[in-house]
Amino acid sequence: MIYRENGQFKTSYRADQAIFPITQDRVAIALLLFVALVVVPLAAHEYLFSAILIPFLILSLAALGLNILVGYCGQISLGAGAFMAVGAYAAYNFQARIEGLPLLISLLMGGLSATAVGVLFGIPSLRIKGLYLAVATLAAQFFVDWAALRLKWVTNDSASGSVSVAGLKVLGIPIESPVAKYLFCLLVVMVFALLAKNLVRGHIGREWMAMRDMDVAAAVIGIRPVYAKLSAFAVSSFIIGVAGALWGFVHLGSWEPAAFNIDRSFQLLFMVIIGGLGSIMGAFFGAAFIVVLPILLDSLPYWFGIPIDTALASHLTYMIFGALIVFFLIVEPHGLARLWSIGKEKLRLWPFPH
């Protein structure tokens, strides 16, 4: 009963096209933001920030960028880890070589660098699609891995190949404590999620979805495939590049090319598929599933006092995790976001669902 929308009338196009047209949704989002911005920083401990919340936020941002390309435009990509690496190393070079450059500018420049690389490797999408495009974007992964290992100027002539950052500040505020890192990541994710939501609701998003559904029909009605596909690669790579810079600067602090290997690309793709293709909310559901579930599965034997070998526990975690992924894909191929939408629809129609 509390989710019914009886009596909520829209009297303007602006009200009808709002992101959250139902009052209950607006209240729920406001409470969620209050908890995230006020309650969590006051109540959570350091391990929760470092192991769960900060990785969840950054990977949600990366999955959000990949979902724009894969979910909204229908262009399969296996190079998300490479674009994260480009964003991280480019931001590091800007920060290291330009003295006094603000952190936010470095992060955005890292995203722009990832945009350039993403558009370059997105050019084959104008001629190929499907599995062939996936292989073409996979080439970006191997090329970036090679460049980070072999080109010394990428790592600022580091002998070991690893780089590190310290003394992060935003507008004179130090970003050193776990709470400060969490709040900084949360604000960045909130801004990009709002921008992405408005982008996919506009004419650009409709062009992407038309190309996803049937590119020939989209071209017939006047949509330019070159512009639609390359703009999707550009926006997606920019967001993923900023996420990669956050992953290196805020979460890791010190990293090497292995931090952005092909496993990261597959992890992000799993987040998009499990969370829900073509859904902004799906990026957050998928990231929560990938980040939180392995930690829970790894901790369950200790919580229940079951004596189990560490290596066996690790293998069982991977087995159960993989089985759950397959189960969710069979039960709901459209992801967890679709289950969320179905639940909301039934609440709106209760007690007469159909």
Image (cartoon, rainbow, N blue to C red):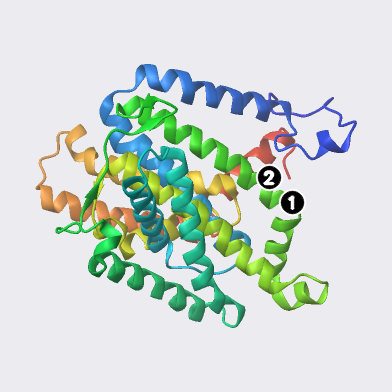
Disc 1 is placed on an element classified as: loop
Residue 230: percent from the left, percent from the top? 61, 68
Residue type pointed to by label 2: Asn
Q: Quadrant of the C terminus?
A: top right
Residue 159: percent from the left, percent from the top? 14, 59
Q: Which residue: 14% across, 39% down? A: 306
Residues packed near mark 1 inside 10 Å, few (<14), some (14 to 19) or many (20 plus)? few
Give whichever of 354, 255 is nearer the camera.
255
Give the left or right position of residue 141, taking residue 159 as reference.
right
Q: Is residue 291 visible?
A: yes
Give whichever of 256, 107 is nearer the camera.
107
Q: How many marks?
A: 2
Quarter where residue 180 is shown? top left
Quarter where residue 39 is shown? top left
Give whichever of 267, 344 is nearer the camera.
267
- Marks 1,2: beta carbons within 8 A: yes
Give the left or right position of residue 352, taking residue 51 as reference.
right
Q: Quadrant of the N terminus?
A: top right
The residue pinned by badge 1 equals 202
Q: Is residue 332 visible?
A: no
Disc 2 is placed on an element classified as: helix
Residue type pointed to by label 1: Gly
Residue 23: percent from the left, percent from the top? 72, 26
Q: Which residue: 57% across, 78% down? A: 129
Give the left or right position of residue 131, taking residue 297 as reference.
right
Give whichever of 64, 340 is nearer the camera.
64
Q: CA distance from mark 1 to mark 2?
A: 6 Å
The residue pinned by badge 2 equals 198
Q: Which residue: 61% across, 47% down? A: 196
Q: Which residue: 19% across, 40% down? A: 301
